[in-house]
Image (cartoon, coloured by chain):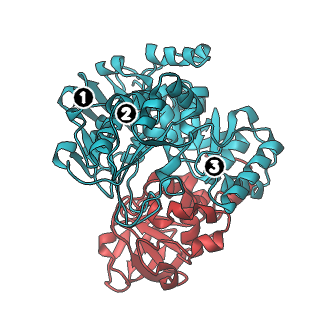
Amino acid sequence: MGKTLAEKILSLKSHGEAKAGDVVIADVDLAFVQDTTGPLTIRQFKESGFETLAKPQQAIIFLDHAAPSPAQQLSNDHILLRRFAQETGCRIYEVGEGICHQLVAENFANPGDVIVGADSHTVTAGALGAFATGMGSSDVGVALALGKTWFRVPESFLIELNGVFPRGVCDKDLILYLIGQIGADGANYKALEFGSEALARMTMSQRLTIANMAVEAGAKVGLFPSDKITQDFLIEHGRGDNYKPLYPDAEANYEQVIAVNLDQLEPILSLPHAVDNVRPVAQVKGVKIQQAFIGTCTNGRLEDLAVATEILKGKKRHPGTRLLIAPASRQVLIRAIEKGYIQSLLEAGATVLPPGCAACLGLHQGVLGDGEVCLSTANRNFKGRMGNPEAMIYLASPATAAASAIRGEITDPREFT
Amino acid sequence: MPDLVLKGKAIKLGDNVSTDDIIPGRFAHLRSNLPELAKHVLEDAVPGFASKVKSGDFLVGGKNLGLGSSREHAPVVIKMSGIGAILAKSAARIFFRNAINQGLPVLLCDTDKIGDGDELEVNLTGGKIANLTSGITLSCSKMPPIMSAILKEGGLIPYIQKHKGFKL
């Protein structure tokens, strides 16, 4: 019997034969927390009687969700996290460095790694072939101390991607389409494994967007095999030696196979208040928006800012629409400045926010007012997500967000490309 | 270790109640002040929930309960509100594991057979739920033995304190 990617990685990391449905204890290569889940992790870690980390250099605290802090309580949480880093010798990424998942992709994740993070979008690193999954504070606290955790080996869905994205359509439209097909719980406890010929043309930035949203279909991981694109990304980020080939066996067993022809896709968005409530943009156009938000671990990368710039350059945001841009990391921001994107976006009327989670989760930097509508490139549009249960959130691609910011209403990006 | 037989009233929720519904991100500044945070449990989804719930009541969800964020504060504040166990048709992966890690039982069963306010008797060891109001008995799906063991110890921290690691 052949193995899926999930079975291959968990077999390797549990030093045995891991088949779907088995429960295994696996080595953890990287464990991390962020500033809204980390304080509980520290309290649970200490309550368990632990004092030291199994692998301090593979343990990270990211200050990204409340960055810079908008409230004294969150500032005090940051103090607690900094103190823990000093006491234990773990790594810490300060306010302004960027979003945990982007920094993990840039600096740490490798094919075949097991990564656990106290944040549901830890799945993002699956783009690099890492078995990366979100857990709660207690589980990550124990993983930090033991360097191990337990997993039920997931059954896998094979997502076969063929064809070429049409003009104005991208990775975000694909993953929203897929979530609409699978449903918000359709892949609960499962692994999504991406394959087939379109992968050869899919950049790491696109793979990160797709893997990031696997959890919105309930999946435990969203895994890509490793290839030349993975290797080039690792070389570019100074860790080419960590590359290893990783692919599923030909005779691997999949619970479902879902084929998507990229040629058939069109711009898609999620309507309030559910990610799987998807509709073609063309059917929803004309809805007025008060805020457009381009950023997050889903769509805050250089390629996303390039797409937004291409549409917004030389134009202005609609006077009734605020345009917020939050680069996913300091490196993304620096590159976007070098390439002139930030200049063009500012001239178009954008407000550029510091690298971090920004407006995504309703803490700061773009909380919505009663009855306001936001078109966001983030991954969640649950009621109340952006700080106000009376607001409405639509999710779409950076191209759709940029086009809609110009018109002040939901707009099909193909009208601008 | 939770009591083996629990008795209480059902508080019914719909499908797809997210962790943002259970404890919204706008209260993130209260996450290191759990008693204050707990006052806001489910306040957008069930107005007045914190004052309505009585110790030993059951939170009865539909499908995909607890989808979304990994915030373990969601089961923490549910437990602090007095809820004795969670029942749902299905529960999102991280939320399920977090609840068990907090020593809060989660039982998966056909919750369409339970109405808001129904009196329930839940047998944790047998995985049976008697709906005393309707007279119907429901069976629950089994969880992996390691989760049962963690729940039996009252959560992940007491489990780890006792076993010093994971045991399969």
Chain identifier matching the red colour in the rendered picture: B
Residue under mark 1: which chain is it in?
A
The circle on residue A183 is none
- Tag of residue A68: 3
Closer-to-camera residue (A282/B22):
A282
Amino acid type, callout 3: Pro
Alpha carbon separation for disc pair 1 and 2: 11 Å
User: Where residue A308 is drawn, which disc sits there?
Assistant: 2
Asked if A106 appears above or below A59 in the picture, the reply is above
Say few, some or many: other residues with alpha carbon within 10 Å of mark 3 (under 14 / 14 to 19 / 20 or more): many
What chain does mark 2 sit on? A
Q: Earlier in the sequence, mark 3 or mark 2?
A: 3
Image point (20%, 50%), residue name = A286
Tell me if residue B21 comes above or below residue A245 in the rendering: below
| Earlier-in-chain disc, 1 versus 2 | 2
User: In this view of the protein, which residue sits in the foreground, A67 or A133?
Assistant: A67
Residue A16 shows in the view: no
Q: Quadrant of the N terminus of chain B?
A: bottom right
Q: Position of residue A83 (x, y in %)?
A: 80, 48
Left or right: A263 as drawn, with respect to A301? left
Give the residue at x 40% y 40%: A214
